[in-house]
């Protein structure tokens, strides 16, 4: 899974208007499959080697991750996803675990300025990168403008998809200040809301995008 495959990164690394949800799903599944195959091959080889020596192959490894401007140290097996580290090891539960197959966007975080799906990233891949979760948006004293706009435009119902939408919106409008409504709908097309808040989300993003263009 490449960071550029998240729809909110549309335009940052792809040119033209040919990006659509089909590309997103296709890219996602190819990336996940490639990762799974590589991991399986690695595991098989390691297990074979380990079995010969009577040891377990994939040992927990200590990783330093930069999350929301703080250095965090975790000790996890190399197969553990960034999403599991956030939720299970660091108690950062804003990114939600819904599909775990790159199809819903509920786990969206920002990695090095681009939206990314935390369920499709191994934690070990994220060493040396700057990770921002929904908990890291805003200044600490002030909530992020995207959150304010979501409230104003009633862009949430059960709220389960909302953190992913907020993060994806932040990444999208940072990359596309002044984006129009149709661009926003397309850019956030990888995030799914079962309650149907799409209109509120789109109008919240539209206001934020206009404010961003105006220098806010
Ligand atoms: S939980 Fe990651 S995309 Fe659905
Ligand atoms: S507000 Fe319920 S899933 Fe989106």
Image: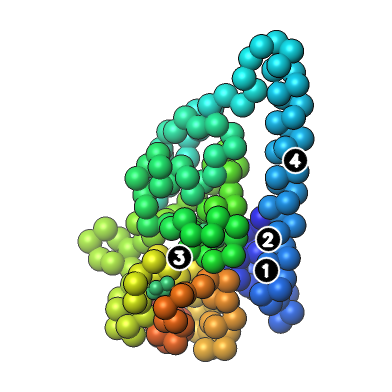
Q: Which residue was labeled with disc 3?
A: 164
- Whether the residues at callouts 3 and 1 have beta carbons within 8 Å, the answer is no
Q: Is residue 12 left or right of residue 170?
A: right
Q: Secondary structure at mark 3?
A: helix
Asked if ligand 1 lies within 8 A of label 2, the reply is: no
* N-terminal-most mark, 3 or 1: 1
Real-space CA distance between mark 1 and mark 2, rounded to the nearest whole angstrom: 6 Å
| Residue in the image at 57% along x and 76% along y | 189
Is residue 124 shown above or below 57?
below
Q: Which residue was labeled with disc 4?
A: 38
How would you rate the neighbour count of disc 4 (Cα within 10 Å): few for under 14, some for 14-19, many for 20 or more? Answer: few
Name which quarter of the figure residue 42 lies in: top right
Q: Which residue was labeled with disc 2?
A: 28
Q: Disc number at residue 211?
A: none
Is residue 177 shown above or below 180?
above
Asked if ligand 1 lies within 8 A of label 3, the reply is: yes
* N-terminal-most mark, 4 or 2: 2
Q: Which residue was labeled with disc 1?
A: 24
């Amino acid at each position: 899974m490449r960071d550029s495959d998240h729809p909110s990164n549309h335009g940052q690394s792809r040119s033209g208007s040919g990006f659509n949800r089909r590309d997103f799903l296709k890219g996602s599944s190819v990336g996940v499959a490639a990762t799974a195959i590589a991991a399986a091959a690695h595991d098989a080889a390691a297990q074979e080697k380990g079995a010969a020596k009577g040891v377990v192959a994939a040992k927990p490894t200590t990783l330093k991750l930069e999350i929301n401007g703080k250095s965090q140290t975790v000790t996890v097996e190399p197969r553990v996803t960034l999403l599991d580290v956030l939720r299970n090891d660091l108690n950062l539960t804003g990114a939600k675990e819904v599909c775990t197959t790159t199809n819903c966007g509920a786990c969206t975080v920002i990695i090095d300025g681009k939206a990314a799906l935390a369920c499709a990233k191994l934690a070990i891949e994220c060493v040396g990168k700057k990770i921002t979760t929904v908990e890291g948006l805003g200044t600490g004293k002030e909530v992020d403008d995207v959150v304010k706009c979501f409230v104003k435009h009633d862009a949430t119902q059960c709220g389960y998809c909302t953190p992913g939408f907020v993060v994806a919106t932040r990444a999208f409008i940072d990359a596309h200040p002044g984006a129009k409504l149709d661009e926003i709908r397309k850019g956030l097309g990888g995030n799914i809301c079962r309650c149907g808040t799409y209109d509120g989300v789109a109008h919240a993003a539209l206001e934020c995008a206009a404010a961003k263009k105006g220098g806010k």
